Image: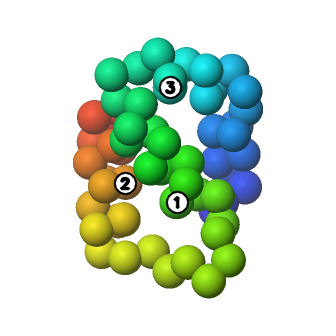
Amino acid sequence: NLNDFSLLKDGNFIELTQQSPLFSEHEALLKLIDNQPNHLASTSDACKVQEILERFA
């Protein structure tokens, strides 16, 4: 449910990710979640998200 990701767009969260060594991964995840029109998630997008989630598990 994409509504669950609404906090990821919070300014504080973005500020924290910019100070994180995983900033580029967070940035990719935020772009993926951003509901870009005509954007279909690819297998590589899914793999990137899975890798990110595993790091925080």
What colouring does the structure picture have?
rainbow
| Mark sitting earlier along the chain (1/3) | 3
| Mark sitting earlier along the chain (2/3) | 3
Q: Quadrant of residue 16?
A: top right
Where residue 47 appears, x then y in whole percent?
27, 61
Where residue 39 appears, x then y in whole percent?
55, 78
Check disc 2 and report its element: helix, strand or loop: helix
Q: Mark on residue 17?
A: 3
Of residue 17 and residue 7, the one placed in the foreground of this image is 17
Q: Which residue is mark 2?
A: 49
Q: Badges 1 and 2: C-beta atoms under 8 Å apart?
A: yes
In the image, residue 32 sits, relative to residue 5, either above or below, namely: below
Q: Nearer the viewer, mark 2 or mark 3?
A: 3
Task: State the CA–CA distance, disc 1 to disc 2.
Answer: 9 Å
Q: Mark on residue 32?
A: 1
Identify which amino acid the numbered label 2 is placed on.
Val
The residue located at (61%, 21%) in the rendering is 15
Identify which amino acid the numbered label 3 is placed on.
Thr
Check disc 1 and report its element: helix, strand or loop: helix
Where residue 49 appears, x then y in whole percent?
37, 54
